[in-house]
Image (cartoon, rainbow, N blue to C red):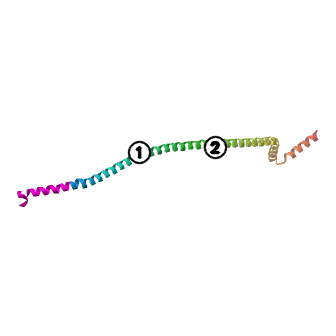
Amino acid sequence: MPQFDVSSFSSQIFWLVVCFSILYIFVSKYLLPKIRGIIDCRIGAIDRTITEICDLKKEIAKTNEDSSKILKLNNKAVKDLIDQEQTKTEEELKQKYNEMNEKINTEIEEVKTLVLSKQKAVLSDLPEITKEVFKMCVNKMMDTSFETKLWDFVKDGVRKH
């Protein structure tokens, strides 16, 4: 086998050193700096992305805090508004209740006055009504007019005296 021939070792070693030296110089001067640049660029991009993510997380946290504060303020404002409207509605309800009570009391007083006036009218007419009822009862019992009988009685009494 020719590669194991000792006389050719020196030329093989020479070309091996030359090829590997050229390859080493090419890789170390040309390929490795490009690869190092790409890796550095990627590391820089990753670092920038991580920094942006951290900044965005901080911004999100700040936005969440601001949103929470605004929601609390809005909730407080809405609660205050509801309380004001509830108080206003209660006051209006009380006012309308009082107005209705006054109206009802006025109408009750009017009805009482009307009943009293009707009662007085009936009581003032009571003697007349009683006389009429008495006459009707006597007429029914006697089948004649009470006035006629009374008139006859009075006439008879006057004649006798």
**In terms of secondary structure, where does tag 2 sit?**
helix
Q: Is residue 68 left or right of residue 148?
A: left
Q: Is residue 101 left or right of residue 57?
A: right
Q: Nearer the viewer, residue 75 or 153?
A: 75
Residue 120 percent coordinates (x, y): 79, 40
The C terminus: image quadrant: top right
Residue found at x 86% / y 45%: 147
**In the rendered image, which residue does mark 1 sit on?**
58
Q: Nearer the viewer, residue 157 or 139?
A: 139
Residue found at x 65% / y 42%: 95
Tag 2: amino acid: Glu
**In the rendered image, which residue does mark 2 sit on?**
92
Residue found at x 9% / y 56%: 10
The residue range painted magenta reads 1-24
Q: Is residue 160 left or right of residue 59?
A: right
Instruction: Say if 117 sits above or below 30 in the image.
Output: above
Closer to us: mark 2 or mark 1? 1
Prevailing secondary structure class for the magenta stretch in the rendered image? helix
